[in-house]
Image (spheres, coloured by chain):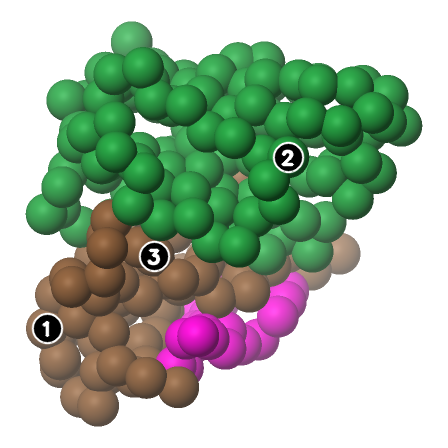
Chain colours: A brown, B green
Amino acid sequence: GQQLNQSPQSMFIQEGEDVSMNCTSSSIFNTWLWYKQEPGEGPVLLIALYKAGELTSNGRLTAQFGITRKDSFLNISASIPSDVGIYFCAGQLFKAAGNKLTFGGGTRVLVKP
Amino acid sequence: DTAVSQTPKYLVTQMGNDKSIKCEQNLGHDTMYWYKQDSKKFLKIMFSYNNKELIINETVPNRFSPKSPDKAHLNLHINSLELGDSAVYFCASSPRQGLGYTFGSGTRLTVV
């Protein structure tokens, strides 16, 4: 089946830093999505990308759908403490039964001590 | 109003017991899902129902039986619970042709 490799697995942020994470797939997707999960909660959709090459922003977050349709990245600019959480990429195929989402393994964003 | 609500939020039970988790969505979505999140936070789909019809069953043991009485509800019943069933179970919903899911806040199941 399809697999998504997300990197880095974890990162430490310092307030004000820009950080980046990415996701690569062994096969193409029609849509890429980025979610954030905070402790005790379910993942919340941050950004959805619908076509290859698309660059979309949501506040301090920017994500891009790779030209090959096999990758995506998420940037967080000027990070703040509340950016801490687990960020998941997810790929979706329109033709897949039930709009199945395949998730990456997550990037844990932590605050530098 | 919570868009996708699951109950209970926490469930601690002994091996061998049978338990159920309930999920309801008030978004008018056609499709509902159950995902399992393991201790490493990996999210894996278990089931998908579209308008009460099962459309995805991802090699889940027969001890897990989803039931959808109507398109707003998808419950998960688990028989003969095992230690390895301990995880967080997320319900989610999406429009039939829509993009992305709305997740519930999860049910943390601990089997002792």
The mark that comes first in sequence, 1 or 3, is 1
Q: Which residue is mark 2?
A: B63
Pinpoint the chain carrying mark 1. A
Q: Is residue A4 magenta?
A: yes
Identify which amino acid the numbered label 3 is placed on.
Answer: Leu
Q: Secondary structure at mark 2?
A: loop
In magenta, the rendered stretch is A1-25
> Residue A105: x and y, percent?
55, 65
Name the quadrant containing residue B67: top left
Q: Nearer the viewer, mark 3 or mark 2?
A: 2
Residue appearing at x 80%, y 36% in the figure: B82
> Which quarter shows the N terminus of chain A?
bottom left
Q: Quadrant of residue B93?
A: top left
Return the residue found at the far bottom: A68
Residue lying at 24% horizontally and 49% vertically, measured from the top left: A98
Q: Main secondary structure of the magenta part?
A: strand
Q: Quadrant of residue B96?
A: top left
Instruction: Sort mark 2 into few (<14), some (14-19) or many (20+) by Cα contacts within 10 Å.
Output: few
The amino acid sitting under disc 1 is Lys
Residue found 16% across the figure and 64% down from its top: A95
CA distance for labels 2 and 1: 40 Å
Nearer-the-camera pick, B66 or B6: B66
Q: Which mark is residue A101?
A: 3
Q: Secondary structure at mark 1?
A: loop
